[in-house]
């Protein structure tokens, strides 16, 4: 039982990462097992492999070398040539340490634990949405970042892979404004947030703050007033409007 918990809770990075030699289920003898127990059985192995694929949204060739691209029968399961397979071993050791030592020490509980899906959420690279958008904006510009957001939302909305709540775009706008000094870019991101969340008063408050910082007092007032239409008790909007009226 203890071994099963280890296998499932340490499924850390990719399909068939540590099981090499033969495809799971083809025969009972596996080569180059370095983390999984040497006597891992076929069903246990299959279960572990499926946990990898579900958690990362990948296939076998993410970590196992296909000698002939596109030919699954040419898979060299024992090979350690692919970097993802090497990374996975470290990830599995890390997860085992978290579940076996760090979490029990921190919480006093021994029946919880992290799995690969805890962080990966169906993504090979589990960056958060704000990180993805900021990297894209820095590399390719705001318009490309906005297009990236729309693409990811269309593909992943409702899956839990990314956080499409107002907070993610809010973080992007805040970083652009405060750390990058890009008020125009921040306003574009906030406008996107308004488009996606037209009933959320806070996104209008953020837009008002950026408009005011950019010298657009008329636009800032309109945004604050709309925020108060949506939420008459919104403290941020009430305070901003009071400041606009000279503190009266």
Image: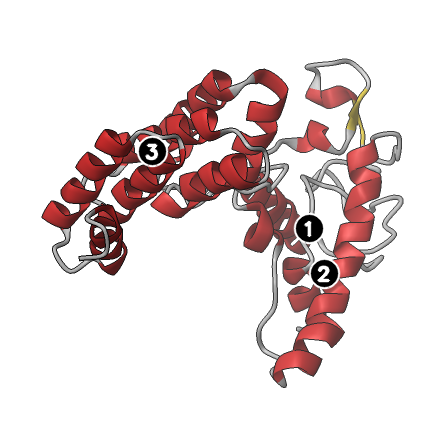
Tag of residue 186 = none
Q: Work out whether mark 2 precedes mark 3 in sequence or the reverse, and give the earlier one.
A: 2
Answer with left or right where residue 100 lies relative to residue 220. Answer: right
Name which residue lies at 65% across and 45% down.
49
Name which residue lies at 58% across and 46% down.
120
Name which residue lies at 34% across and 33% down.
211
Residue lying at the far bottom of the rendered structure: 108
Check disc 3: other Cα within 10 Å, few if <14, some if 14-19, many if 20+.
Answer: many
Check disc 1: other Cα within 10 Å, few if <14, some if 14-19, many if 20+.
Answer: many
Q: Work out whether mark 1 precedes mark 3 in sequence or the reverse, and give the earlier one.
A: 1
Q: Quadrant of residue 134?
A: top right
Quadrant including the C terminus? bottom left
Q: Quadrant of residue 146?
A: top left
Determine whether the residue tagged by mark 1 lies in a helix, strand or loop.
loop
Between 146 and 88, the one lying in front of the other is 146
In space, the residues marked 1 and 3 are separated at their CA atoms by 44 Å
Instruction: Provide the residue designation for mark 3.
Output: 211
**x then y, percent, for residue 60:** 68, 32
**x then y, percent, for residue 153:** 38, 31
**x then y, percent, for residue 144:** 49, 17
In space, the residues marked 2 and 3 are separated at their CA atoms by 45 Å
Front tag of 1 and 3: 3
Determine whether the residue tagged by mark 3 lies in a helix, strand or loop.
helix
Determine whether the residue tagged by mark 2 lies in a helix, strand or loop.
helix
Instruction: Provide the residue designation for mark 2.
Output: 95
Task: Decide if residue 129 is in sight here.
Answer: no
Q: Are marks 2 and 1 in contact (CB under 8 Å)?
A: yes
**x then y, percent, for residue 78:** 87, 36
Instruction: Provide the residue designation for mark 1.
Output: 12
Name which residue lies at 80% across and 43% down.
87
Q: Work out whether mark 2 precedes mark 1 in sequence or the reverse, and give the earlier one.
A: 1
């Amino acid at each position: 039982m203890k071994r099963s918990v280890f296998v499932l809770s340490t499924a850390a990075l990719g399909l068939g990462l540590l099981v090499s030699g033969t495809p799971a289920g083809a025969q009972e003898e596996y080569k180059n097992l370095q983390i999984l127990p040497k006597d891992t059985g076929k069903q246990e192995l299959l279960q572990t492999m499926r946990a990898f694929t579900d958690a990362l949204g990948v296939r076998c060739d993410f970590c196992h070398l296909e000698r002939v691209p596109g030919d699954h029968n040419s898979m060299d399961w024992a090979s350690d040539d692919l970097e993802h397979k090497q990374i996975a071993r470290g990830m599995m050791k890390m997860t085992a340490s978290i579940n076996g030592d760090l979490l029990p020490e921190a919480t006093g509980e021994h029946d919880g634990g992290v799995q690969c899906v805890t962080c990966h959420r169906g993504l090979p690279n589990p960056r958060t949405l704000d990180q993805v958008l900021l990297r894209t904006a820095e590399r390719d510009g705001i318009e490309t970042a906005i297009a990236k957001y729309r693409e990811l939302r269309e593909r992943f909305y409702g899956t839990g892979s990314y956080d499409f709540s107002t907070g993610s775009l809010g973080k992007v706008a805040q970083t652009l404004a405060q750390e990058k000094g890009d008020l125009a870019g921040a306003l574009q991101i906030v406008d996107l947030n308004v488009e996606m969340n037209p009933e959320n008063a806070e996104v209008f408050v953020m837009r008002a703050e950026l408009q005011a910082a950019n010298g657009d007092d008329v636009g800032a007032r309109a945004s604050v007033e709309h925020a108060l239409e949506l939420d008459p008790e919104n403290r941020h909007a009430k305070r901003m409007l009071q400041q606009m009226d000279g503190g009266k």
